[in-house]
Amino acid sequence: MHIVESSNGPIIAIISGGSVTMYSISGQHIDGNWWIGENVTMLDSIGDDVVYVTEDNPTELHFAQIGNEGSIAQKLNFSASDIENEILTSWGLTVDEANATISDISITRTHAAVSVDVNATTRLVLLDRYTGESYIVGDPKYPVFTPHLDHGLLVWAAQNHFNPSNPIEKYFDKEILMLDLSTNRTEVLTSDEIEQWAPMALENHIIFSQANQDGSTSVEVLNRNAQLQPYSSIVLQTSVILMMGLIFLNIVQRQLEYRRGNISEEE
């Protein structure tokens, strides 16, 4: 299920059997046929703009608009150099770019960010919607998860420096990274041995989920000012949660998807 914040009000989009069914908040069915004949596997949206992925073309993005017919397909550049792929192979991993699939999407008016699964790892790709150009963000050897775009920032979780053939415990967990699109500067927001995932960029804050040592899961809030120092005020975190109800609902959904993905990998 996905909430589309269209110009005519929120729309609930449900993917089932490759088709998309849309309803208004009041439960009224909304017609739409931009996906007709295609097996849709996932989608994201901003305003009336919708981006989706199909089973037949799992590494292409299809852009459509609510109320209009048809869509535009956009290919992505997710191939790494031979040297990078050879390193992955030396770690005992199989790189399969020919059968790659998109596993996460996030879009804004100007960009789209996706994680692409090439079997050996997942790569973060950033697409400029105006020029159609795309490129890999970060090191293509290390897996990335749950990218999110907003407010001129791209944030994601990653297992930087993790080598499965020679695993080092301090690199087991995921860290949170941020790319400022205006400066093309990347920052590591966390550097510890705590599992963190599902980051989101707000206007003045970065939020993400964290697995604490006592077994609990918390939502952490970082201030983008003051060198991104974490907030310790419970009152402030509570007020942010109250104001951002829909955003935190999205976090919970990402947590469930993350856990389901882990369960599938273990099976």
Image: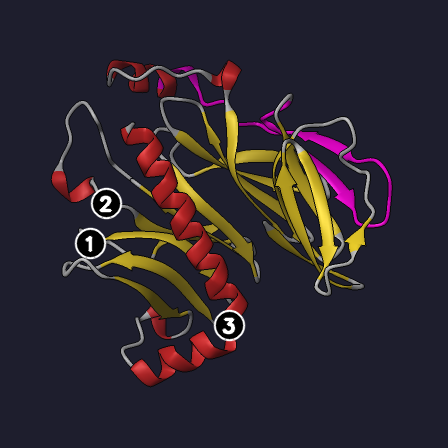
Q: Which of marks 1 and 2 is nearer the N terminus?
A: 2
Helix, strand or loop for disc 1: loop
Q: Quadrant of residue 128?
A: top right
Q: Mark 2 points at which residue?
A: 173
Along the horizontal axis of the image, is 18 left or right of 149? right
Q: Name the residue under label 1.
A: 192
Give me the C-alpha separation between circle 2 and circle 3: 27 Å
Are circles 1 and 3 on residues that touch, CB within 8 Å?
A: no
Residue type (three-letter) at the residue carrying disc 3: Met
Q: Residue at x 15, y 44 (%)?
A: 170
Q: Residue furthest front?
A: 27
The residue lying toward the viewer, choosing from 11 and 66, is 11
Q: In which quarter of the image is residue 138?
A: top left
Q: Earlier in the sequence, mark 1 or mark 3?
A: 1
Tag shown at residue 101: none
Give me the C-alpha separation between circle 1 and circle 2: 8 Å
Helix, strand or loop for disc 2: loop
Q: Which region shows up in magenta?
A: 57-83
Expressed as whole percent of the image width and height from the top left, the position of residue 203 reads 53, 70
Residue type (three-letter) at the residue carrying disc 2: Asp
Q: Is residue 209 above or below residue 87?
A: below
Q: Residue at x 82, y 38 (%)?
A: 33
Q: Which residue is drawn at 40% across and 49% down?
A: 256
Are circles 1 and 2 on residues that touch, CB within 8 Å?
A: yes
Can the viewer see residue 48?
Answer: yes
Q: Mark 3 points at which residue?
A: 244
